[in-house]
Amino acid sequence: MKEDLLYNPFFWAPLLTGIFYFALGYIMIKYPPKYGNGIYGYRTARANKSVQHWNFAQKFSAIMLKKLGVLCLPLCTLGMISEGKSETVFMFITIAIILFPIGVILYLTEKYLKEI
């Protein structure tokens, strides 16, 4: 079974997604994007509205990336329970694990940016 995990995308996708989101959040906190940066950061019309909006969006989304990245890590156990089960179901679950944090970050950051 341990050897099967090495080749199981339902194990690696959530694990690598969690690590990637956490690392990206860490980088954004350690090296926050400057206002008007076109390379990286949380860039939406509402975040670009002012420097205050920009700074809030960068910090808040980075913190959320780190938190949701950590929450993705235990979901790699899907790979352990997926043996012999429908790959289609696990594929959709894995895609949801990858995309759900992005949706949560967009929703919450925009919600709080409206209040500023």
Image: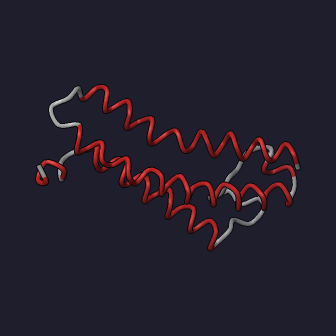
Q: Residue at x 64, y 72 (%)?
A: 31
Tell me where residue 56 sits by quadrant: bottom right
Residue 35 in the figure: left or right of residue 16: right
Residue 42 in the figure: left or right of residue 87: right
* Residue 39 x/y as whole percent: 63, 58
* Residue 102 x/y as whole percent: 57, 43
Residue furthest out toward the bottom = 30
Give the colouring mode of the picture: secondary structure
Residue 69 in the figure: left or right of residue 65: left
Look at the picture and state if 112 lies above or below 91.
Answer: below
Q: Residue at x 53, y 52 (%)?
A: 68
Q: Nearer the viewer, residue 37 or 90?
A: 90
Look at the picture and state if 99 lies above or below 77.
Answer: above
Tell me where residue 84 sits by quadrant: top left
Look at the picture and state if 97 lies above or below 65.
Answer: above
Q: Residue at x 57, y 68 (%)?
A: 27
Residue 84 in the figure: left or right of residue 94: left
Q: Residue at x 23, y 39 (%)?
A: 81
* Residue 49 x/y as whole percent: 86, 49
Q: Nearer the viewer, residue 54 or 97?
A: 97
All told, the count of numbered labels is 0
* Residue 86 x/y as whole percent: 23, 26
